[in-house]
Amino acid sequence: MTRKDATSSECSRLSRRTLRHFTGFLRACRQVSREACAVLYGSNHFHLFTTFSDDIRSFLEKIGESNRRSIRSLKIDWVHGVRECTDEGGVLDIIETLDETRNAACGGANPFWDDIFGSLLRYKTETVLHIRLTLELLARGHGLKELALVIPGRDACKLRVDRYEEDTKRERYDMKYFGWELLLHHRELQLALESIRGLEKLSIGHTVCLGRMEQIARKMGVTDLTVTWTASEGQDYGFPDEVIHMVQDEGWDVELEAYKAHKLLSGPNYSSSGGNSIAWWYCSCDECL
């Protein structure tokens, strides 16, 4: 054997030995990474909000199903994005523009109103889609024990639109909402939410329909339900004493100053009368009429 052959053989042995060491090291790194991720995602409460509503789904998708299943406590807030930004500017900015163009028309026809309001409606459609896709992603696989959802409701912006109609020579007054009771008025969101199973605690807002939320929570198998609404809803409508007493009789703990109601949904049996009677007096969804 020549010196060159001996050197080559020794290098080969060293390469195999080094490869074994590195393979073991990489295997250990992967194991440490898996264990660390399980601790990271399983031991922390995640509160997700963003300017663009689809970023939330994107994040939950990119961390992978294994890490997603490790999360035990999650809060998702879609109201922040609605308030902050659209392609045309914030929703509040769009509404302000609507007011400005309406006033600039001085009671006459406003050629820009439909275009601007159309932007608002397009953004609403996109937001509903992103919320649905996120809920469906969670339904396909999660390890959650607690889930809190803040879905645009009356707080997401409302405006009064005064439009002058040339054909009737009259002004028309419309109250327009970006997402008035968004969850209640979009059946696809309700179905997506109902498909999430295995939760212990659910917090849902912003809505005033306790009855419908209880029905959804029971289908999900939730045993601890909190429903939240907004300060503007309390100011606009108030909560009559008779309604509060009725709700409390149904087992709800109402905190008016905190704008929330809590109920333990113990037992598998559900009284259909409760689902109707506990709705707020001004709720107009089908389940409460």
Image (spheres, rainbow, N blue to C red):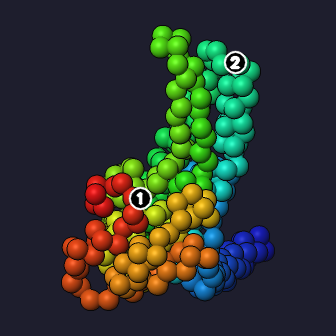
Please give the name of the residue rendered at 34% of the width and 82% of the height, measured from the top-left corner. 250
Q: Is residue 262 above or below residue 231?
A: below
Q: Which mark is residue 282?
A: 1
Which quadrant is the N terminus positioned in? bottom right
Q: Which mark is residue 105?
A: 2
**Of 232 and 38, the residue lying toward us:** 232
The image shows residue 268 at horizontal and vertical percentages of 23, 85
Residue placed furthest toward the top: 167
Please give the name of the residue rendered at 41% of the width and 66% of the height, measured from the top-left corner. 280
Number of marks in picture: 2
Q: Is residue 201 visible?
A: no
Mark 2, secondary structure of its residue: loop
Q: Residues within 10 Å of mark 2 (few under 14, many from 20)?
A: some
Q: Earlier in the sequence, mark 2 or mark 1?
A: 2
Residue type at tag 1: Tyr
- Quadrant in which residue 112 is drawn: top right
Q: Which mark is residue 175?
A: none
Mark 1, secondary structure of its residue: loop
The image shows residue 77 at horizontal and vertical percentages of 59, 62
Q: Is residue 284 left or right of residue 101?
A: left
Q: CA distance from mark 2 to mark 1?
A: 35 Å
Residue type at tag 2: Ala
**Of 64 and 263, the residue lying toward us:** 263
- Quadrant in which residue 257 is drawn: bottom right
The image shows residue 235 at horizontal and vertical percentages of 60, 61
Q: Is residue 182 left or right of residue 187?
A: right
**Of 67 and 133, the residue lying toward us:** 133
